Amino acid sequence: MRIFINLLLITFLSICAPSSPLNAQIIKLGDAVVDGSNQMSIAFESADPTIAGIGQRLFNLHGGFRITPSKDSAFVIRIERASSNAVLLTIGSGQPYQEQLRQKVSSNDLGSAVLKACDLSVQATLKMPGFFSGKLAFIGKQRGVSEVYLSDMLFSQVRPLTADRAAVTGPSWSPSGTSLLYTTYYKAGFPDIYKIDLSTGRKIPIATYKGTNSGGRYSPDGQRIAMTLTAGGGNTEIYIADAMGKSPRRLTTNDSLEASPTWSPDGRRLAFTSDAFGKPQIYEISTSGGPMRRLQTNVSRYCAEPAWNPTNSNLIAFTVGVGGGFQIALYDASKGGAEIITSGGGDAIEPAWLNDGRHLVFTKRAGGRTRLMILDTVSKQVRALHVPSFGDASSASFVY
């Protein structure tokens, strides 16, 4: 129950392939060469050591690829420096080798260009978006002080965004990546929701009502915010307001505690945590109002922290209590149930989807420390996003 109570208290650059870069051969291969571990064999090559190092790290992080010698690979991906802020991407296949794609990719600097080229490679081979050029917002704890941080996916460019020196939680990106919401005790000593404009650094109050204000989440179109409010007293309930927090409209009205709203991909429904069943469970409700409905996860008496898949409305990831700890589970409405998708020692909590609808970032809690991990829900590969010496990191939000 501790996670649930804490929640209540504290609570694009387009890189798609050109219209015809790949011929029928590469499409056929892309559909056929994923092996029994759900990984595609590729060779990654570059004469530039910096590019080679970045590319190797990215494709090892993904989970959908296995790096092999070129003679054993389905595709050979080659990225070479073209200028200080551009690279040349080529993708080929076959014996003898045949080039299937050749494209110059530019960005603000060389590293960003490599990320974009690798994303284009994912799109070309696996037929799904890449996430390498995305950004993370998360709660980082350095020298005992927690603040909101921003980072790239390789944790090579990390910077603090806030200097509140107060309890902060729940950062959430706007779909445009120009602002984010978070909950802070900064001014009032009570949880309030603020918006940070990244272009100016200005903090704008979104919900500062008497009582608890937490869990702010933008709708998929960025026009509305779902949040959890007590609105002066009583139980925490789910509300929807406009993008500036104005004109809040109450969705739930009951004697139970609600928290952690998450939007369906079409913006017509919310999933959230409620203890109306006696223990925390996942519920959904129409954003236009009406009764709330419990999702039949059939996996645990403790289900919390839902995260709705951005590309598949049938899928919701959430935190589940199991075996005296916590793991990440995946509810599939088309199957009418859920399965646990993480394992091992320590707790896995706070799932957050990436843009491809395949990967999750979650918080790993073990030995009194927290660390951000990435999970490929297809191959089930789990990788750490940062080294332990960085310090504690938790509550990730992703934007592309």
Image (cartoon, grey):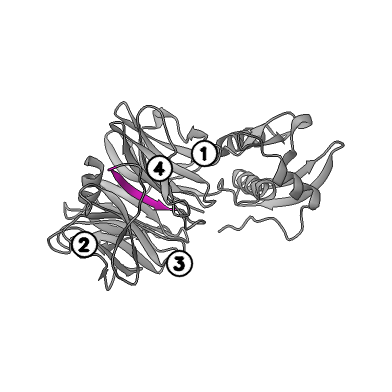
Q: Measure the alpha-carbon separation of dots 4 and 1.
A: 25 Å
- State which mark lies toward you, 3 or 4: 4
In depth, the one of 50 and 275 nearer the eye is 275
Question: Residue 258 magenta-drawn?
Answer: no
From which residue to which does the magenta span run?
A: 301-308
First reached walking from the N terminus: tag 2 or tag 3: 2
Residue position for label 1: 154
First reached walking from the N terminus: tag 2 or tag 4: 2
**Drawn side of residue 68 relative to residue 145, left or right:** right
Tell me the SS state at disc 3: loop
- Mark 2 and mark 1 residues within 8 Å of each other at the beta carbon: no
Residue type, mark 1 in image: Leu
Examine the rendered structure and indicate whether residue 210 appears above or below residue 158: below
In depth, the one of 377 and 160 nearer the eye is 377
Q: Position of residue 338 (x, y in %)?
A: 41, 45
- Mark 3 and mark 4 residues within 8 Å of each other at the beta carbon: no
Residue type, mark 4 in image: Ala
Residue position for label 2: 208
**Drawn side of residue 37 relative to residue 381, left or right:** right
Q: Residue 328 falls in which quadrant of the image?
A: top left
Q: Residue furthest left?
A: 233
- State which mark lies toward you, 2 or 3: 3
Query: Can I make out residue 137 in this image?
Result: no
Name the disc covering residue 329, or none. 4
Tell me the SS state at disc 2: loop
Name the disc covering residue 221, or none. 3
Residue type, mark 3 in image: Asp
Q: Position of residue 269 (x, y in %)?
A: 38, 64
Q: Main secondary structure of the magenta part?
A: strand
- Mark 2 and mark 3 residues within 8 Å of each other at the beta carbon: no
